[in-house]
Image (cartoon, rainbow, N blue to C red):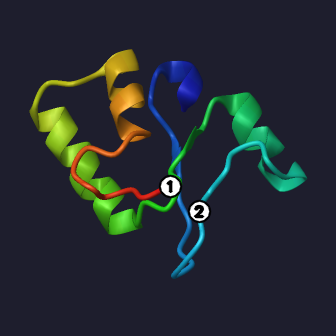
Amino acid sequence: MTARGCPVLTLTQAPSGAVEVGAYAASQPLARAGALPGADLTPEAALAKLQALLSAGVSGDELRKRLVRPLRGEMTV
């Protein structure tokens, strides 16, 4: 997916904690593929964030940059 320009955001379903792409052996393939760390973003917040950014016309590298930084307090890590 990342090779085709689609951002891949890694998320956790755990009630606490955060995703760190590349920090552990299990996530190395994700890091090599260019997956983005979702930190402590919930799946629901990730979907809402993606919808908001796409509807605002954000795409490409700018979309990837905005997905991994807090915009409205949805990420705390």
Residue at 58% of width from left, 21% of height from top?
3
Q: Nearer the viewer, mark 1 or mark 2?
A: 1
Quadrant of the rendered image containing residue 6: top left
Q: Which residue is denoted by mark 1 in the rendering? A: 77
Q: Is disc 1 placed on a helix, strand or loop?
A: loop
Give the image location of residue 14, x and y in percent. Answer: 57, 78
Mark number, residue 13: none
Pick the residue in front: 27 or 74. Answer: 74
Give the image location of residue 55, x and y in percent. Answer: 11, 36
Q: Is residue 75 above or below residue 50?
A: below
Quadrant of the rendered image containing residue 26: bottom right
In space, the residues marked 1 and 2 are separated at their CA atoms by 7 Å
Give the image location of residue 42, x and y in percent. Answer: 40, 66
Which quadrant is home to the N terminus?
Answer: top right
Residue at 62% of width from left, 57% of height from top?
19
Q: Residue furthest left?
A: 56
Which badge, 1 or 2, comes first in the chain's sequence? 2
Q: Is disc 2 placed on a helix, strand or loop?
A: loop
Residue at 40% of width from left, 27% of height from top?
65
Q: Which residue is denoted by mark 2 in the rendering? A: 18
Q: Amino acid at mark 2?
A: Ala
Give the image location of residue 25, x and y in percent. Answer: 89, 50
Q: Residues within 10 Å of mark 1 (few under 14, many from 20)?
A: few
Q: Residue furthest top?
A: 61
Quadrant of the rendered image containing residue 71: top left
Q: Amino acid at mark 1?
A: Val
Residue at 15% of width from left, 44% of height from top?
52
Q: Residues within 10 Å of mark 2 (few under 14, many from 20)?
A: many
Cβ atoms at labels 1 and 2 below 8 Å apart: yes
Judge left or right: residue 24 versus residue 40: right
Judge left or right: residue 25 versus residue 73: right
